[in-house]
Image (cartoon, grey):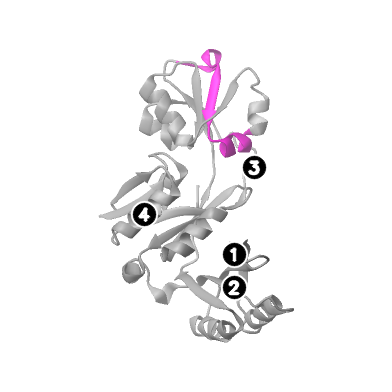
Protein backbone atom coordinates (compact mmCIF):
# COMPACT_ATOMS: atom_id res chain seq x y z
CA UNK A 1 0.00 0.00 0.00
CA UNK A 2 1.26 3.46 -0.90
CA UNK A 3 1.33 6.08 1.86
CA UNK A 4 0.65 9.60 0.55
CA UNK A 5 1.09 12.79 2.56
CA UNK A 6 -1.29 15.60 1.57
CA UNK A 7 -2.30 19.00 2.94
CA UNK A 8 -5.96 18.86 3.92
CA UNK A 9 -8.56 16.38 5.09
CA UNK A 10 -10.49 13.62 3.27
CA UNK A 11 -12.59 15.20 0.55
CA UNK A 12 -10.13 18.04 -0.03
CA UNK A 13 -8.86 18.72 -3.53
CA UNK A 14 -5.49 17.19 -2.57
CA UNK A 15 -7.35 14.02 -1.57
CA UNK A 16 -9.33 13.99 -4.83
CA UNK A 17 -6.18 14.56 -6.92
CA UNK A 18 -4.32 11.77 -5.11
CA UNK A 19 -7.12 9.30 -5.75
CA UNK A 20 -7.46 10.33 -9.39
CA UNK A 21 -3.70 9.98 -9.93
CA UNK A 22 -3.33 6.56 -8.27
CA UNK A 23 -6.62 5.23 -9.62
CA UNK A 24 -7.47 1.78 -8.33
CA UNK A 25 -4.23 1.42 -6.38
CA UNK A 26 -4.66 1.10 -2.63
CA UNK A 27 -3.40 4.20 -0.83
CA UNK A 28 -3.25 5.41 2.75
CA UNK A 29 -3.53 9.17 3.15
CA UNK A 30 -1.49 11.06 5.73
CA UNK A 31 -3.54 14.23 6.21
CA UNK A 32 -1.50 17.27 7.28
CA UNK A 33 -2.46 20.77 8.39
CA UNK A 34 0.37 22.50 6.51
CA UNK A 35 2.65 21.90 3.54
CA UNK A 36 5.62 22.07 5.92
CA UNK A 37 4.17 19.06 7.71
CA UNK A 38 3.81 17.21 4.39
CA UNK A 39 7.51 17.61 3.63
CA UNK A 40 8.44 16.73 7.23
CA UNK A 41 6.67 13.37 6.84
CA UNK A 42 8.68 12.65 3.70
CA UNK A 43 11.92 13.55 5.45
CA UNK A 44 11.21 11.34 8.47
CA UNK A 45 10.08 8.35 6.36
CA UNK A 46 11.57 7.97 2.86
CA UNK A 47 8.87 5.45 1.92
CA UNK A 48 6.20 8.18 2.10
CA UNK A 49 5.15 9.91 -1.11
CA UNK A 50 3.66 13.39 -1.19
CA UNK A 51 1.19 15.18 -3.44
CA UNK A 52 1.30 18.98 -3.36
CA UNK A 53 -0.37 21.72 -5.38
CA UNK A 54 2.09 23.85 -7.33
CA UNK A 55 0.04 25.93 -9.77
CA UNK A 56 -3.52 27.06 -10.46
CA UNK A 57 -4.73 28.39 -13.80
CA UNK A 58 -6.47 31.32 -12.10
CA UNK A 59 -4.55 32.03 -8.87
CA UNK A 60 -1.11 31.29 -10.36
CA UNK A 61 1.87 29.60 -8.72
CA UNK A 62 2.06 28.52 -5.08
CA UNK A 63 5.38 30.25 -4.51
CA UNK A 64 6.04 28.88 -1.03
CA UNK A 65 5.72 25.32 -2.31
CA UNK A 66 8.49 25.99 -4.83
CA UNK A 67 10.76 26.92 -1.93
CA UNK A 68 9.73 23.89 0.13
CA UNK A 69 10.32 21.60 -2.85
CA UNK A 70 13.79 22.94 -3.55
CA UNK A 71 14.87 22.87 0.11
CA UNK A 72 13.49 19.38 0.71
CA UNK A 73 15.61 17.58 -1.87
CA UNK A 74 12.53 15.63 -2.96
CA UNK A 75 12.20 14.38 -6.53
CA UNK A 76 9.17 14.95 -8.77
CA UNK A 77 7.99 11.59 -10.09
CA UNK A 78 4.60 12.57 -11.54
CA UNK A 79 1.92 15.22 -11.85
CA UNK A 80 -1.84 15.50 -12.12
CA UNK A 81 -4.09 18.33 -13.33
CA UNK A 82 -7.45 18.43 -11.57
CA UNK A 83 -10.42 20.46 -12.74
CA UNK A 84 -11.63 22.50 -9.77
CA UNK A 85 -15.39 22.04 -9.40
CA UNK A 86 -17.31 23.37 -6.41
CA UNK A 87 -20.59 22.26 -4.87
CA UNK A 88 -22.65 23.68 -2.02
CA UNK A 89 -23.86 21.23 0.64
CA UNK A 90 -25.54 21.16 4.03
CA UNK A 91 -26.98 18.77 6.62
CA UNK A 92 -29.58 16.36 5.18
CA UNK A 93 -32.38 17.97 7.22
CA UNK A 94 -31.66 21.49 5.95
CA UNK A 95 -32.61 23.10 2.66
CA UNK A 96 -32.16 26.44 0.90
CA UNK A 97 -34.76 28.17 3.07
CA UNK A 98 -32.89 27.11 6.23
CA UNK A 99 -29.45 28.41 5.30
CA UNK A 100 -27.96 31.47 6.98
CA UNK A 101 -24.19 31.01 6.54
CA UNK A 102 -21.79 29.52 4.00
CA UNK A 103 -18.25 28.43 4.90
CA UNK A 104 -15.23 27.68 2.72
CA UNK A 105 -11.61 28.54 1.98
CA UNK A 106 -11.23 32.15 0.77
CA UNK A 107 -9.94 31.04 -2.65
CA UNK A 108 -12.96 28.77 -3.16
CA UNK A 109 -15.29 31.59 -2.13
CA UNK A 110 -13.62 33.88 -4.64
CA UNK A 111 -14.00 31.24 -7.35
CA UNK A 112 -17.75 31.09 -6.62
CA UNK A 113 -18.25 34.86 -6.44
CA UNK A 114 -20.93 35.01 -9.16
CA UNK A 115 -22.96 32.26 -7.50
CA UNK A 116 -22.72 33.93 -4.09
CA UNK A 117 -23.79 37.27 -5.57
CA UNK A 118 -27.19 35.67 -6.19
CA UNK A 119 -27.42 34.52 -2.55
CA UNK A 120 -26.76 37.69 -0.62
CA UNK A 121 -28.91 36.41 2.22
CA UNK A 122 -26.06 34.08 3.18
CA UNK A 123 -23.31 35.27 5.51
CA UNK A 124 -19.98 34.31 3.91
CA UNK A 125 -17.38 33.06 6.42
CA UNK A 126 -13.82 32.10 5.50
CA UNK A 127 -12.28 28.94 6.97
CA UNK A 128 -8.94 27.22 6.45
CA UNK A 129 -10.08 24.30 4.27
CA UNK A 130 -12.87 23.52 1.81
CA UNK A 131 -13.53 19.96 2.92
CA UNK A 132 -12.80 20.98 6.50
CA UNK A 133 -15.90 23.18 6.34
CA UNK A 134 -17.98 20.14 5.37
CA UNK A 135 -16.36 18.06 8.11
CA UNK A 136 -17.19 20.70 10.74
CA UNK A 137 -20.84 20.95 9.66
CA UNK A 138 -21.17 17.18 9.95
CA UNK A 139 -19.20 16.76 13.18
CA UNK A 140 -20.82 19.69 15.01
CA UNK A 141 -24.28 19.14 13.47
CA UNK A 142 -24.33 22.76 12.31
CA UNK A 143 -27.84 23.49 11.07
CA UNK A 144 -28.33 26.61 8.90
CA UNK A 145 -24.72 26.26 7.63
CA UNK A 146 -23.51 25.26 4.18
CA UNK A 147 -20.05 24.35 2.88
CA UNK A 148 -18.54 24.95 -0.55
CA UNK A 149 -16.14 22.19 -1.58
CA UNK A 150 -15.76 19.21 -3.92
CA UNK A 151 -18.88 17.13 -4.40
CA UNK A 152 -17.14 13.99 -3.06
CA UNK A 153 -16.99 15.56 0.42
CA UNK A 154 -20.77 15.19 0.70
CA UNK A 155 -20.50 11.40 0.51
CA UNK A 156 -17.66 11.33 3.02
CA UNK A 157 -19.39 13.51 5.61
CA UNK A 158 -23.02 12.54 5.01
CA UNK A 159 -24.17 15.90 3.65
CA UNK A 160 -26.77 16.84 1.05
CA UNK A 161 -25.66 18.49 -2.18
CA UNK A 162 -27.84 21.49 -3.01
CA UNK A 163 -26.15 22.47 -6.26
CA UNK A 164 -23.10 21.36 -8.23
CA UNK A 165 -20.82 23.26 -10.58
CA UNK A 166 -21.20 26.62 -8.84
CA UNK A 167 -17.69 27.83 -9.75
CA UNK A 168 -17.61 30.90 -12.00
CA UNK A 169 -14.83 29.71 -14.31
CA UNK A 170 -15.35 26.26 -15.81
CA UNK A 171 -11.74 26.06 -17.02
CA UNK A 172 -10.05 26.23 -13.63
CA UNK A 173 -7.38 23.57 -13.07
CA UNK A 174 -4.84 22.98 -10.31
CA UNK A 175 -1.61 21.19 -11.10
CA UNK A 176 -0.34 18.80 -8.42
CA UNK A 177 3.14 17.28 -8.17
CA UNK A 178 3.80 13.76 -6.91
CA UNK A 179 7.02 13.71 -4.89
CA UNK A 180 9.35 10.99 -3.68
CA UNK A 181 12.58 10.76 -1.74
CA UNK A 182 15.45 10.66 -4.30
CA UNK A 183 16.58 7.18 -3.31
CA UNK A 184 13.15 5.72 -4.01
CA UNK A 185 12.20 7.71 -7.10
CA UNK A 186 12.95 4.74 -9.37
CA UNK A 187 10.14 2.78 -7.71
CA UNK A 188 7.49 5.29 -8.71
CA UNK A 189 8.35 6.31 -12.27
CA UNK A 190 9.77 4.75 -15.42
CA UNK A 191 12.38 7.15 -16.75
CA UNK A 192 11.74 5.76 -20.24
CA UNK A 193 8.26 7.32 -20.09
CA UNK A 194 9.55 10.75 -19.04
CA UNK A 195 8.66 13.60 -21.39
CA UNK A 196 8.79 16.49 -18.94
CA UNK A 197 11.33 17.90 -16.49
CA UNK A 198 11.50 20.59 -13.82
CA UNK A 199 14.76 22.46 -13.17
CA UNK A 200 15.83 25.33 -10.92
CA UNK A 201 18.93 27.49 -11.42
CA UNK A 202 20.47 30.85 -10.63
CA UNK A 203 22.38 33.00 -13.11
CA UNK A 204 25.30 35.41 -13.13
CA UNK A 205 24.09 38.99 -12.77
CA UNK A 206 25.17 39.77 -16.33
CA UNK A 207 23.47 41.16 -19.40
CA UNK A 208 21.89 38.44 -21.56
CA UNK A 209 22.40 35.58 -19.09
CA UNK A 210 18.76 34.43 -19.24
CA UNK A 211 18.44 34.91 -22.98
CA UNK A 212 21.48 32.66 -23.46
CA UNK A 213 19.69 29.86 -21.58
CA UNK A 214 16.54 30.32 -23.65
CA UNK A 215 18.55 30.26 -26.88
CA UNK A 216 20.09 26.91 -25.97
CA UNK A 217 16.69 25.42 -25.12
CA UNK A 218 15.34 26.68 -28.43
CA UNK A 219 18.30 25.22 -30.32
CA UNK A 220 17.58 21.78 -28.84
CA UNK A 221 13.86 22.21 -29.65
CA UNK A 222 12.62 21.92 -26.07
CA UNK A 223 9.25 23.40 -25.15
CA UNK A 224 9.46 25.78 -22.18
CA UNK A 225 6.04 25.29 -20.58
CA UNK A 226 6.62 27.26 -17.37
CA UNK A 227 9.08 29.80 -15.99
CA UNK A 228 8.86 31.21 -12.48
CA UNK A 229 11.37 33.50 -10.80
CA UNK A 230 11.80 33.91 -7.04
CA UNK A 231 14.20 36.24 -5.23
CA UNK A 232 17.18 34.72 -3.43
CA UNK A 233 16.85 35.78 0.20
CA UNK A 234 19.86 37.79 1.34
CA UNK A 235 21.12 38.42 -2.20
CA UNK A 236 19.56 41.63 -3.46
CA UNK A 237 18.33 41.52 -7.08
CA UNK A 238 19.41 37.92 -7.51
CA UNK A 239 16.84 35.30 -8.53
CA UNK A 240 16.18 31.60 -8.81
CA UNK A 241 14.48 30.49 -12.03
CA UNK A 242 12.19 27.47 -11.93
CA UNK A 243 11.41 26.08 -15.38
CA UNK A 244 9.36 23.20 -16.75
CA UNK A 245 10.43 21.62 -20.03
CA UNK A 246 8.59 19.17 -22.24
CA UNK A 247 10.35 17.01 -24.81
CA UNK A 248 9.92 13.97 -27.03
CA UNK A 249 13.60 12.99 -27.21
CA UNK A 250 15.18 12.23 -23.84
CA UNK A 251 18.75 12.24 -25.13
CA UNK A 252 18.33 15.63 -26.78
CA UNK A 253 16.84 16.97 -23.54
CA UNK A 254 19.86 15.69 -21.57
CA UNK A 255 22.19 17.32 -24.08
CA UNK A 256 20.38 20.63 -23.52
CA UNK A 257 20.77 20.33 -19.75
CA UNK A 258 24.49 19.65 -20.16
CA UNK A 259 24.75 22.67 -22.46
CA UNK A 260 23.07 25.16 -20.11
CA UNK A 261 24.72 23.96 -16.89
CA UNK A 262 28.01 25.90 -17.48
CA UNK A 263 25.95 29.04 -18.13
CA UNK A 264 24.33 28.93 -14.67
CA UNK A 265 25.72 29.62 -11.23
CA UNK A 266 23.86 26.64 -9.79
CA UNK A 267 21.50 24.17 -11.45
CA UNK A 268 19.37 21.52 -9.75
CA UNK A 269 17.19 18.95 -11.45
CA UNK A 270 13.91 18.68 -9.53
CA UNK A 271 12.51 15.74 -11.46
CA UNK A 272 11.93 13.96 -14.76
CA UNK A 273 8.45 12.55 -15.19
CA UNK A 274 5.52 11.94 -17.50
CA UNK A 275 3.28 14.88 -18.44
CA UNK A 276 0.23 14.62 -16.20
CA UNK A 277 -3.30 13.76 -17.26
CA UNK A 278 -6.31 15.98 -16.61
CA UNK A 279 -9.38 14.86 -14.66
CA UNK A 280 -12.55 16.27 -13.11
User: How many residues crowd mark 2 within 10 Å: few (<14), some (14–19), many (20+)?
Assistant: many
Instruction: State which mark lies toward you, 4 or 3.
Output: 4
Instruction: Tell which circle, 4 or 1, labels the residue nearer the N-terminal end.
Output: 4
Q: Which residue is the site of mark 3?
A: 169
Q: Secondary structure at mark 3?
A: loop
In the rendered image, is residue 19 in sight? no
Name the residue nearer the viewer: 230 or 129: 230
Instruction: Tell which circle, 4 or 3, labels the residue nearer the N-terminal end.
Output: 4
* Stretch in magenta: 94-112
Q: Secondary structure at mark 2?
A: strand
Q: Secondary structure at mark 1?
A: loop
Q: Which residue is the site of mark 1?
A: 232
Instruction: Report the disc number at residue 220.
Output: none
Q: Which residue is the site of mark 4?
A: 40
- Dividing the picture into quadrants, the one containing residue 239 is bottom right
Q: Which residue is the site of mark 2?
A: 202
129 up-or-down from 97: above or below? below
- In three-dimensional space, the C-alpha distance between marks 2 and 4, rounded to whole angstroms, equals 26 Å
Name the residue nearer the viewer: 5 or 204: 204
Q: Report the side of 204 relative to 73 (left or right).
A: right
Instruction: Tell which circle, 2 or 3, labels the residue nearer the N-terminal end.
Output: 3
Q: Secondary structure at mark 4?
A: helix
Q: Report the side of 161 relative to 113 (left or right).
A: left
- Location of the N terminus by quadrant is bottom left
Instruction: State which mark lies toward you, 4 or 1.
Output: 1
> Is residue 103 covered in magenta?
yes
Instruction: Tell which circle, 1 or 2, labels the residue nearer the N-terminal end.
Output: 2
156 up-or-down from 142: above or below? below
User: How many residues crowd mark 3 within 10 Å: few (<14), some (14–19), many (20+)?
Assistant: some
Amino acid sequence: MKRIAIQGVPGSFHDIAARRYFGTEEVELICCDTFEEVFAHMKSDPSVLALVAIENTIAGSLLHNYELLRDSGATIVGEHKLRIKHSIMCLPGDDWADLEEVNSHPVALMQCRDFLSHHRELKVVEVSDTAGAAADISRLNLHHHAAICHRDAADIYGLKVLEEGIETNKHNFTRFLVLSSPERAGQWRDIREANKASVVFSLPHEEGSLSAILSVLSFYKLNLTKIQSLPIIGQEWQYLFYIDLSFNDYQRYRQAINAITPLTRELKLLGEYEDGKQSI
